[in-house]
Image: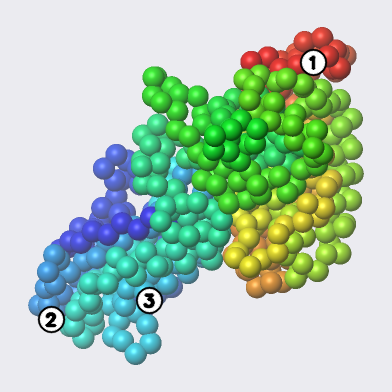
């Protein structure tokens, strides 16, 4: 969450601006999210305000300044905007209201034992760059004429944003610890906005790596899948040798001559470092040696199951596999953090796989679910290591989502799969709720479950050809006709048994 503060000398002018069209017609769906008691509190909330209502609100912000003549340096109006990175979890108005009251309390504009000041929070639709945000307009003159002291506001807002990012399961900003999720830098956010991307590149790369790691049985398969996923990959060998890989970096291919921006696994998320990933893969000494060979190559040396296209019936098997996994999860005590972190990790990879297949370059509810589950999977210091045996079923389903054949007969199975994925989210969310992690539970259940219900209805009512961006549906008379896999970004040739990668 990013906090931006400005000051001014006219509450009337600020409120007119916030309820107006904005500098580039970017303001829409303007509404009062919440307000302090001086301006009427919750009774003021809502949209469709008249010009007189807007004028009265602005006058209310200016009233103490005009009545007492108190004139703080820099102006008596405090304007705070709180915004989320593009592609981050969407918050409800009720949640934004909670955050607004936390912010005003942290800044000393309201709270027990102090004279209040007038303030309100105004919500808009997302910005032109895709940022969900709110504006808080406040008077720095209290109702008794005294000034609000803002000398500590920068530190207070930094602490507040860190607390909100943790409590509301949001993406942390660089410089603030986020339980295993590295923060986004201002440069990344500015580049995301400049390039008009749906989300920061780091978020997309993290989801790809998580998907590939969960779908893979061993390290060599992970390398092959990652090389086939339209990203650049480079290994980091032990110092002075080429016999042991100790880390890796990934990047998207450069555009317009710009150099690629590389991210090490730990910069994507703590659980995506190579040592942490290795805890979840099978592997003998021979497998590890093959992995070194694959890391050293520029194309697949020994393609395996990732090169075999699945069949339409795989989707129905996936439904049964998830149903079985959820039944097992429902028997796990909420206190068994190792099992639940492992389950969240595997489920995140599954949702990520299907997001790339279904949503393509425009992340939607599947991507949002993957990201929320990834946060759920992160360990706090001292937590037990996530279990690799929590729900192995999800790993096989992730592979199906990544590469099984699409056909005109698939959407009904997809609708059933959505039902089971919704059950998965609710089950993991209930475990968080039982541990008192209410906002994480909300992030998984409240909004995402509803979005998946909408997606379920689309699968039941839409033509399959309308549902998959960037892919051609397979002709049901020929399992390989027109097949184009979006996730692995390779086109198969020949039988499913001799299929390799096309770079």
Find disc 2 in the rendering and name its residue.
Answer: 68
Q: Residues within 10 Å of mark 1 (few under 14, many from 20)?
A: some
Can see residue 20?
yes
Percent of width and height locating residue 181: 54, 53
Q: Which residue is the extreme one toward the top?
A: 494
Could you say which quadrant of the image residue 2 lies in?
Answer: bottom left
The answer for how far apart the CA atoms under marks 3 and 1 are is 62 Å
Q: Residues within 10 Å of mark 2 (few under 14, many from 20)?
A: some
Percent of width and height locating residue 491: 71, 15
Question: Exactly how many numbered labels are in the figure?
Answer: 3
Find disc 3 in the rendering and name its residue.
Answer: 105
In the structure shown, which secondary structural element does the residue marked by tag 3 occupy? helix
Can see residue 447?
no
Question: What residue sits 17% from the left and 61% below the top?
Answer: 8
Q: Nearer the viewer, residue 127 or 380?
A: 380
Q: Residues within 10 Å of mark 3 (few under 14, many from 20)?
A: some
Could you say which quadrant of the image residue 168 lies in?
Answer: bottom right
- For marks 2 and 3 on the same chain, the one whose residue lies earlier in the sequence: 2
Find disc 1 in the rendering and name its residue.
Answer: 499
In the structure shown, which secondary structural element does the residue marked by tag 1 occupy? loop
The answer for how far apart the CA atoms under marks 2 and 1 are is 80 Å
Asked if residue 499 is positioned above or below residue 200 in the image, the reply reads above
Q: Nearer the viewer, mark 2 or mark 1?
A: 1
Q: Which residue is the extreme one toward the bottom?
A: 113
Q: Are marks 3 and 1 in contact (CB under 8 Å)?
A: no
Q: Quadrant of the C terminus?
A: top right
Could you say which quadrant of the image residue 385 lies in?
Answer: bottom right
Question: What residue sits 79% from the left and 37% below the top?
Answer: 285
């Amino acid at each position: 969450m990013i906090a931006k503060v400005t000051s001014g000398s006219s509450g009337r002018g600020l409120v007119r601006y916030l309820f107006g069209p904005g500098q580039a017609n970017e303001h829409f769906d303007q509404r009062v999210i919440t307000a302090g008691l001086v301006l009427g509190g919750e009774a003021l909330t809502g949209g469709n305000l008249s010009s007189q209502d807007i004028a009265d609100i602005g006058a209310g912000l200016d009233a103490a300044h005009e009545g007492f003549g108190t004139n703080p340096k820099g102006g008596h109006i405090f304007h705070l905007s709180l915004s989320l990175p593009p592609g981050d979890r969407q918050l409800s108005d009720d949640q934004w209201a909670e955050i607004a009251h936390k912010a005003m309390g942290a800044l000393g504009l309201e709270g027990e034992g102090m004279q209040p000041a007038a303030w309100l929070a105004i919500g808009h639709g997302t910005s032109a760059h895709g940022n969900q945000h709110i504006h808080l307009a406040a008077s720095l003159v209290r109702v008794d004429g005294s000034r609000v002291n803002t000398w500590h506001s920068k530190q207070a807002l930094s602490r507040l944003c860190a607390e909100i990012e943790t409590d509301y399961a949001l993406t942390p900003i660089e410089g603030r610890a986020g339980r295993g999720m590295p923060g986004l830098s201002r440069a990344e956010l500015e580049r995301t906005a400049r390039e008009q991307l749906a989300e920061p590149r780091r978020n997309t790369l993290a989801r790809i790596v998580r998907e590939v790691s969960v779908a893979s049985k061993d390290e060599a398969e992970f390398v092959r899948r990652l090389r086939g996923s339209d990203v650049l990959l480079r290994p980091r060998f032990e110092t002075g040798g080429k016999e042991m890989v100790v880390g890796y970096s990934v990047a998207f291919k450069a555009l317009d001559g710009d150099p690629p921006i590389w991210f090490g696994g730990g910069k994507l998320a703590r659980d995506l470092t190579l040592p942490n990933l290795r805890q979840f893969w099978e592997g003998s000494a021979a497998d590890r040696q093959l992995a070194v060979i694959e890391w050293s190559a520029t194309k697949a040396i020994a393609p395996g199951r990732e090169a075999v296209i699945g069949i339409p019936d795989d989707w129905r098997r996936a439904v049964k596999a998830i149903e079985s996994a959820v039944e097992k999860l429902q028997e796990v005590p909420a206190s068994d953090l190792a099992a639940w972190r492992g389950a969240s990790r595997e489920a995140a990879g599954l949702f990520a796989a299907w997001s790339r297949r279904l949503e393509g370059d425009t992340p939607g509810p599947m991507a949002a679910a993957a990201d929320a589950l990834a946060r759920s999977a992160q360990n706090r210091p001292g937590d037990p290591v996530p279990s690799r045996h929590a729900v192995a079923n999800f790993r096989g389903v992730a592979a199906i989502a990544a590469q099984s054949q699409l056909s005109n007969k698939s959407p009904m199975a997809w609708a059933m799969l959505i039902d089971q994925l919704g059950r998965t989210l609710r089950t993991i969310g209930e475990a968080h709720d039982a541990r008192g992690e209410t906002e994480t539970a909300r992030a998984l259940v409240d909004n995402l479950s509803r979005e998946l219900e909408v997606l379920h209805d689309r699968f039941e009512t839409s033509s399959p050809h309308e549902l998959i961006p960037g892919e051609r549906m397979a002709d049901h008379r020929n399992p390989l006709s027109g097949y184009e896999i979006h996730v692995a970004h390779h086109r198969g040739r020949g039988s499913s048994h001799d299929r390799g990668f096309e770079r």
